[in-house]
Amino acid sequence: MSKKTEYRNDHLDALRAMVVGIWGKEKYTLLRDYIQSSSRARKKWSQRTYVDLYCGPGRVIYRETGEYADGGALVAWKQSVASDAPFTHMYISDSDPKNVEACEQRLKAFGVLVTAHVGMVVSMASKIASSLPNGLHLGLFDPFSLG
């Protein structure tokens, strides 16, 4: 039996944040490093998209420390801006509509052009892939609690 995903309200914006293990810090460091190291390649393209099919709510709280932090989509956006090759469009999806709504609100607060979908990853992958413009795309496919 799979463990139920736990959420808490984030003190910054009162939207939900997903409770995760401390391993998330390493995952987000790797994501930042990859986005930074690929920035020169992204700059060569007029369309630079990011796809996250398991976006979650966009913020996390580490179970072990109680620290709130950005989730994958926000980490990706902020690092793309910091590396001077911002994504021109972000596509997010999750099976939980509350997660999609929270992540979309957070991205839009930064002025991100975002397309949000609610649904299972199998159907969302095809739907999003067929709508991508000609460009350089980065996808994060990191399921949480597959149980």
Image: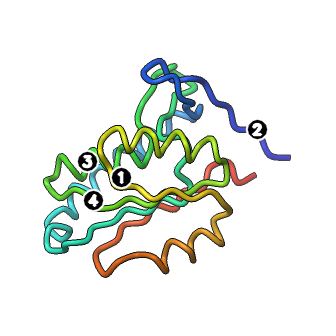
Query: What number of labels is visible?
Result: 4
Q: Do the residues labelled 1 and 2 touch (CB within 8 Å)?
A: no
Q: Mark 4 points at which residue?
A: 87
* Kind of residue indicated by mark 4: Phe
Viewer-side label of 3, 4: 4
- Whole-Å distance between the Cαs marked 2 and 3? 30 Å
Question: At numbered mark 2, what does the secondary structure look like: helix, strand or loop?
Answer: loop
Q: Do the residues labelled 3 and 4 touch (CB within 8 Å)?
A: no
What's the mark number on residue 4? 2
Question: At numbered mark 4, what does the secondary structure look like: helix, strand or loop?
Answer: loop
Q: In this view, does 3 lie above or below 129?
A: above
Callout 2 crowding tier (Cα within 10 Å): few <14, some 14–19, many ≥20: few
Q: Do the residues labelled 4 and 2 touch (CB within 8 Å)?
A: no
What's the mark number on residue 31? 1
- Whole-Å distance between the Cαs marked 4 and 2? 33 Å
Q: Which of marks 1 and 2 is nearer the N terminus?
A: 2
Viewer-side label of 1, 4: 4
* Kind of residue indicated by mark 1: Leu
* Kind of residue indicated by mark 2: Lys
Q: Do the residues labelled 1 and 3 touch (CB within 8 Å)?
A: yes
Q: Which of marks 2 and 3 is nearer the N terminus?
A: 2
Q: Earlier in the sequence, mark 3 or mark 4?
A: 3
Q: Earlier in the sequence, mark 1 or mark 3?
A: 1
Instruction: Residue at 52%, 62% (x, y): give it.
Output: 141
- Whole-Å distance between the Cαs marked 3 and 4? 10 Å
Q: Is residue 101 above or below residue 64?
A: below
Q: What percent of the width, then of the height, locates residue 60?
A: 50, 33
Question: At numbered mark 1, what does the secondary structure look like: helix, strand or loop?
Answer: helix
Q: Do the residues labelled 1 and 4 touch (CB within 8 Å)?
A: no
Instruction: Residue at 20%, 49% (x, y): give it.
Output: 81
Q: Name the residue under label 3.
A: 79
